[in-house]
Amino acid sequence: FFVTWNWHQVVVKSSADVIVGVMIFIGFWVIGYSLVFGFVEVCCMYLLHRDFFFLFF
């Protein structure tokens, strides 16, 4: 029983570590992608609608 419980605990702990690692990896990837995509989008919008920016601002 002790060995089974210990094995179960190890499996749960390793699974939790894997899940946390994947969540952190996905979180960093999403944040980085959002920052890059937002920056590119702002630059493209500025270049495409530069006249509108000058008109309104």
Image: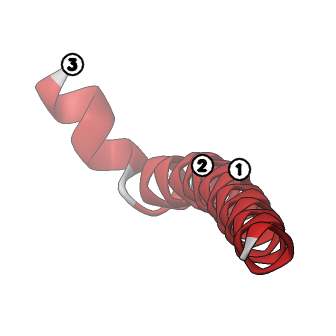
- Dot 2 or dot 3: first in sequence order is 2
What residue is at 48 percent from the left and 48 percent from the top?
Answer: 42
In this rendering, position of residue 30 left or right of residue 13 = left
Relative image position of residue 5 (x, y in whole percent): 70, 70
- For discs 2 and 3, the disc positioned in front in the rendered view: 2
Give the image location of residue 33, x and y in percent.
Answer: 66, 61
Type of amino acid under label 1: Phe
Mark 2 and mark 1 in contact? Answer it, CB < 8 Å: yes
Residue 31: give its label.
2
Q: In which quarter of the image is residue 9?
A: bottom right
Residue lying at 67% horizontally and 69% vertically, measured from the top left:
12
Residue 1 percent across, percent down from the top left: 72, 77
Asked if 5 appears above or below 25 in the picture, the reply is below
Relative height, residue 14 to residue 7 (above, below): above
* Quadrant housing residue 17: bottom right
Provide the residue designation for mark 1.
28
Question: Helix or strand or loop: what does disc 3 sit on?
Answer: loop
Numbered-mark total:
3
**CA distance separating discs 2 and 1:** 5 Å
Q: Residue at x 61, y 46 (%)?
A: 35
Location of mark 3 (residue)? 57
For residue 48, which numbered disc appears in the image?
none
Residue 31 in percent (x, y) is at 60, 49
Q: Which of 29 and 24 is in front in this view?
A: 24
Q: Give the residue type at disc 3.
A: Phe
Q: In which quarter of the image is the C terminus?
A: top left
Residue name at image x 78 percent, y 66 percent? 2
Real-space Cα distance between discs 3 and 1? 34 Å
**In the rendered view, how is the structure colored?**
secondary structure
Taking depth in this image into account, of 54 and 27 the one nearest to the observer is 27
Question: Mark 2: which amino acid?
Answer: Ile
Number of residues whose C-alpha sits closer than 10 Å to that of mark 3, classed few (under 14), some (14–19) or many (20 or more): few
